Image (cartoon, rainbow, N blue to C red):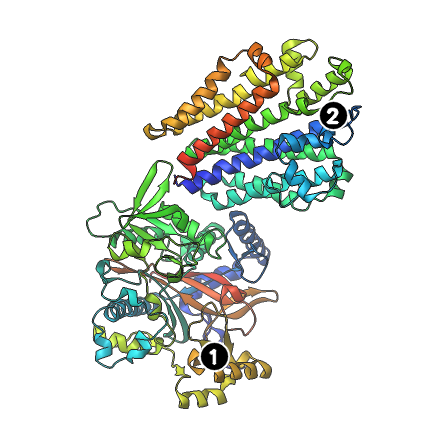
């Protein structure tokens, strides 16, 4: 690929962009040996603390570190203001959409979205129709994936509205950078992100069932073998709430209780990191070993709040994604601030035939896929890979969408052959409750292989600290 | 505290203690097997010294399902390395580490790191390596890992509910195991009836004392020959012997007083009764009833107490 990418640090003629000047100066005057030593220190510290994630498809219980790169991704203050507004706008519209499709179906009646696409979607939960949730909020925590293509030009790639993960890395990366390079923070105005757990707790308390003065919050995890278990334990500990598994909870008279050594204790809000299907074996998948029988009944009775709500998956489905800008216009009567990536829907015959001919320049994704599994990055693929994918698409075209290969921006990253540009994306975490909030920053993921556009940690991606400048 | 967390902590304590006591049990067996013995009735396999640890831990049936022949090697493989025998040293260390991992937030990082390194060393052991190193060396290593964990726990952990549940597990397990190890002598035959009180008898009692870290204390307290009566007194009734039944019950009773509330009277009562029996017990009564019979009854009662703790705190219905 010889296309010119936008580099976050350097502009035309390799001139350092103003918001990177402070870091660039520091990088220049700091001896290479000292930087190498700090990178070692970071790696050892991450190992000791055990900031790991489990990898599917390897030995059971394999725990690995996500590579951490010390060159920060820096966002100038003005760009962040736009991003922040755009993200809040988008998540607001998505919550209104979820409320609508589980109540009056106004957007369907107005013909903005085809009805079958929503009501016939496997992620649509019929059980939620007509049910009121506190504040009308469904996606309490949204992890919106954003990429930059050019100057001030941001695109939303995906809205993750189910159980988005990664926020613990955002927090740990910042802690690590402040520990390794305090001088960088002392001399520059970098906006803090450390209050995320407080905001999250306040947000969760704010959506408790009505009338609860002192709502009890808990984090519900599938258990110690889940790939994101570290994050679940981390967030529970940071918020100072219990980390529970399904077996720790039971439901009586539609109220949810934890089993404690001092007897049953009521829970009002569950920050659940368990997928819809597995939440309650008596309502959804009956083979779920990690759920709580009766939880859905308690939820329907309004005695417990689930964050995120059940049935949010329909709004972040890739077949719904192309309609998000229309949702913003429909519900907020505003123009979308952030761009969508143009998307071809392969279920449509004319779009299918175009895409089949242009696989080498497109990114093809499964409609229900996540985590970078089951996708084709055209320009980086071999002829054989494209042929295999073509056959899969033609067999089930409605399972796929395609997008142009965006020239994702790059950020300088330490590699075996020194500092080199690598592609990055950004996942800010938008909290919705009584208000819509986000900390200035997010998780920057970096594709460590040269030229690669896949940043997912399950596919060998790394992470960086994300700095939002105060001015 | 969540019942599941309490349960993991309690079993973490029990499993580490059990690993240590399996090592002690194998140690006394190993020592006794070096003494002369003679099969009184050939064919009675349980009389062989290596059958004794199986009988006292109630694992004989399970052993014979897995192994055809009784031999030192098979018993050692079974009780140290077998990954399907829940009480093998391998399984105990693995279970303790898994418990620690699932409740990392409730213990200190030093405790987790200690259990983690014990497990990482244990998982690469095999029979040949243990033989090459020497059985006694290996059993000593297991005991040292347990001592280290106890020290780390004592030295780093907040005295909160979590600490009390670990301590409870440790002492329930120790009381049970001490009783079983004491019972080893009952199952170990002497070459002939005339040997009662003779040299072999003496060596057997001293091996048992050593395996419970009681030999030196015995010498200090009694400065006299080893008699069954005094061994019973030392390891059952003396509260200043850290592995004695009385001492274990002191810890259990104290810990339960902290953990119990108005709803847990039955647990407190069961522990109090068992404690009182040891506190006011007399050596003469034990000898008159028979040491083996006394120990069997104790094992039943400590197991019942474990059941009460389970029902009330750890896995309530």
Residue A145, position as x, y percentages in the image: 40, 68
User: Which chain is mark 1 on?
Assistant: A
- B57 on left or right of A453: right
Q: Residue at x 48, y 31 (%)?
A: B306
Q: Which quarter of the image is occupied by the C terminus of chain A?
A: bottom left
Question: Which residue is denoted by mark 2 in the rendering?
Answer: B32
The percent position of residue B182, horizontal first and vertical second, equals: 63, 23
Q: Is residue A445 left or right of residue A141?
A: right
Residue at position x 56%, y 28% in the image: B176
Q: Position of residue A186 (x, y in %)?
A: 41, 52
- Quadrant assignment for the N terminus of chain A: bottom right
Q: Which of pointers 2 and 1 indicates the residue nearer the eye?
A: 2
Query: Which chain contains the residue that carries disc 2?
Result: B
Residue found at x 54% / y 45%: B98
Q: Which of these two is toward me, B170 or A160?
A: B170
Q: Which residue is mark 1?
A: A363
Density class for disc 1 (Cα within 10 Å; few <14, some 14-19, many ≥20) is: many
């Amino acid at each position: 690929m010889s296309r010119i990418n936008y580099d976050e640090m350097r502009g035309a003629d390799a001139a350092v962009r103003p918001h990177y000047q402070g870091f660039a100066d520091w990088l220049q005057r700091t001896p290479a040996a000292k930087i190498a030593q700090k990178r070692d220190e970071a790696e050892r510290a991450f190992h000791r603390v055990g900031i790991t994630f489990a990898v599917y498809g390897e030995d059971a219980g394999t725990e690995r570190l996500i590579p951490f790169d010390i060159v920060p991704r820096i966002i100038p203050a003005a760009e962040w203001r736009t991003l922040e507004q755009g993200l809040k706008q988008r998540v607001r519209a998505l919550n209104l959409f979820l409320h609508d499709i589980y109540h009056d179906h106004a957007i369907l009646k107005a013909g903005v979205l085809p009805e079958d696409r929503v009501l016939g979607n496997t992620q649509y939960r019929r059980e939620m129709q007509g049910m009121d949730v506190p504040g009308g909020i469904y996606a309490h925590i949204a992890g919106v994936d954003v990429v930059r293509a050019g100057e001030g030009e941001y695109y939303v790639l995906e809205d993750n509205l189910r159980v988005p993960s990664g926020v613990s890395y955002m927090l740990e990366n910042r802690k690590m950078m402040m520990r390794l390079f305090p001088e960088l923070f002392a001399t520059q105005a970098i906006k803090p992100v450390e209050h995320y757990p407080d905001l999250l707790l306040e947000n969760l308390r704010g959506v408790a069932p009505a009338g609860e003065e002192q709502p009890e919050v808990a984090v519900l995890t599938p258990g110690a073998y889940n790939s994101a278990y570290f994050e679940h334990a981390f967030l529970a500990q940071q918020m100072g709430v219990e980390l529970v598994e399904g077996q720790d909870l039971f439901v009586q008279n539609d109220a949810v209780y934890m089993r404690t050594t001092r007897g049953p204790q009521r829970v009002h809000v569950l920050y659940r990191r368990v997928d819809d299907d597995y939440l309650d074996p008596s309502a959804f998948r009956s083979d779920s070993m990690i759920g709580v029988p009766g939880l859905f009944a308690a939820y329907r009775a309004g005695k417990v709040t689930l964050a995120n709500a059940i049935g949010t998956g329909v709004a972040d489905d890739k077949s719904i994604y192309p309609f998000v800008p229309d949702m913003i216009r429909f519900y907020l009567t505003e123009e979308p601030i952030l761009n969508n990536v143009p998307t071809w829907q392969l279920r449509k015959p004319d779009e299918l035939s175009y895409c089949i001919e242009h696989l080498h320049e497109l990114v093809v994704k499964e409609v229900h896929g996540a985590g970078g599994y089951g996708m084709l990055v055209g320009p980086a693929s071999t002829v054989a890979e494209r042929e295999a994918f073509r056959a899969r698409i033609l067999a089930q075209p409605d399972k796929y969408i395609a997008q142009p290969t965006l020239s994702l921006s790059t950020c300088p990253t330490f590699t075996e052959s020194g500092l080199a540009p690598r592609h990055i994306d950004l996942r800010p975490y938008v909290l919705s409750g009584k208000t819509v909030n986000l900390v200035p920053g997010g998780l920057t993921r970096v594709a460590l292989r040269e030229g690669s556009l896949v940043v997912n940690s399950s596919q060998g991606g790394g992470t960086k600290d994300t700095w939002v400048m105060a001015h | 505290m969540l019942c599941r967390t309490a349960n993991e902590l309690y079993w973490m304590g029990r499993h580490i203690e059990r690993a240590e006591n399996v090592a002690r049990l194998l140690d006394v067996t190993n020592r006794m097997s070096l003494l002369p013995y003679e099969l009184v009735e050939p064919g009675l396999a349980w009389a062989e010294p290596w059958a004794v640890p199986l009988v006292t831990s109630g694992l004989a049936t399970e052993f014979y399902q897995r192994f055809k022949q009784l031999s030192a090697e098979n018993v050692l493989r079974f009780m140290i390395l077998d990954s399907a025998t829940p009480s093998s040293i391998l399984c105990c260390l693995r279970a303790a580490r898994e418990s620690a991992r699932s409740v990392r937030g409730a213990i200190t990082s030093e405790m987790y790191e200690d259990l983690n390194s014990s497990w990482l060393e244990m998982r690469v052991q095999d029979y040949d390596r243990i033989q090459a190193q020497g059985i006694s060396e290996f059993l000593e290593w297991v005991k040292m890992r347990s001592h280290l964990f106890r020290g780390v726990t004592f030295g780093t952990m907040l005295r909160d509910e979590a600490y009390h549940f670990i301590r409870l597990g440790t002492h329930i397990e120790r009381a049970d195991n001490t009783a079983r190890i004491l019972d080893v002598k009952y199952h170990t035959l002497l070459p002939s009836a005339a040997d009662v009180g003779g040299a072999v008898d003496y060596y057997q009692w001293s091996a048992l004392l050593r395996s419970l870290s009681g030999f030196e204390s015995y010498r200090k307290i009694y400065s006299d020959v080893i008699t069954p009566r005094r061994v019973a007194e030392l390891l059952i009734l003396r509260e200043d012997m850290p592995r004695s039944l009385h001492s274990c019950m002191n810890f259990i009773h104290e810990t339960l007083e902290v953990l119990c509330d108005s709803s847990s009277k039955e647990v407190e009562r069961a522990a109090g009764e068992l404690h009182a029996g040891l506190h006011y017990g007399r050596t003469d009564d034990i000898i008159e009833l028979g040491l083996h019979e006394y120990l069997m009854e104790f094992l039943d009662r400590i197991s019942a107490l474990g059941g009460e703790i389970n029902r009330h705190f750890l896995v309530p219905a």
